[in-house]
Image (cartoon, rainbow, N blue to C red):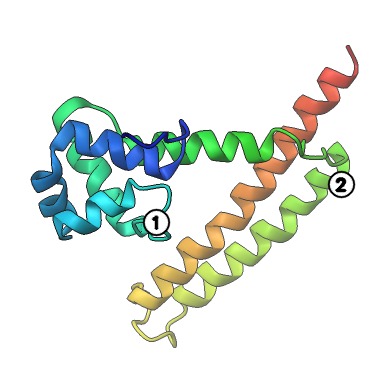
Amino acid sequence: MTKIRVAGTFEDATLDVLRILGVTNAAKAANLSPKTIRDYSDPDRAGRPTLAKSVLLDAACYAKVGRAPFLEAYTKQLAEATEQTPRPAGDVLSEALDLPGAIGRLLDVVRKSRAPGSPYGVKLSPNEASAIVKEIKQPRQELDDLEFAVVSATKANG
């Protein structure tokens, strides 16, 4: 008797992978045993593939049929988990005023990395490059927050 798997679950995604690739190819793609990969599709078993294994399995499926079952399951679960909690929009001016600080911090990291006394002088060291890339994320988030506030304010006005 076949067990019922709820659509959009990781067990269902594993079953899709097994249908697309077959047990042997799926096991090879994720460097797992065939028994382990079959167990991942069983809703009564506790184990699930790690994120890294899921990516390997999705990549193999995508190469074969253009689908990524674990990404589809994750996206469905994320949509269900977030549809009940709408994100509150901030005030447009407050969000806009957060930008200069974030840009200032980014500029400070860039300035320090270009100083003659920095580890590589005016050239970027790997650590400095990593710090800059990390710092770029904050202004990007501030811009996203500002855009969301502007769009939300526009919707609220009719």
Type of amino acid at the residue the image marks with label 1: Arg
Label 2 belongs to which residue?
94
**Residue 146, relative to residue 50: is it above or below?**
above
- Residue at left offset 32%, top offset 52%: 40
- Residue at left offset 43%, top offset 84%: 118
Type of amino acid at the residue the image marks with label 2: Ser
Tell me residue 33's x, y (percent).
15, 60
Q: Residue furthest top?
A: 158
Q: Callout 2: few (<14), some (14-19), or many (20+) C-alpha neighbours within 10 Å?
A: few
Label 2 SS: helix
Relative to residue 31, is residue 40 drawn left or right?
A: right
| Residue 46, quarter of the rendered image | bottom left
| Residue 49, quarter of the rendered image | bottom left
Question: Do residues under tags 2 and 1 come within 8 Å of each other at their CB atoms?
Answer: no
| Residue 67, quarter of the rendered image | top left
Label 1 SS: loop
- Which one is nearer the viewer's eye here, 3 or 21? 3
**How many circles with numbers are drawn on the protein?**
2
The C terminus appears in which quarter of the rendering? top right
Relative to residue 78, is residue 127 drawn left or right?
A: left
- Residue at left offset 23%, top offset 58%: 36
Label 1 belongs to which residue?
45
Tell me residue 147's x, y (percent).
70, 34
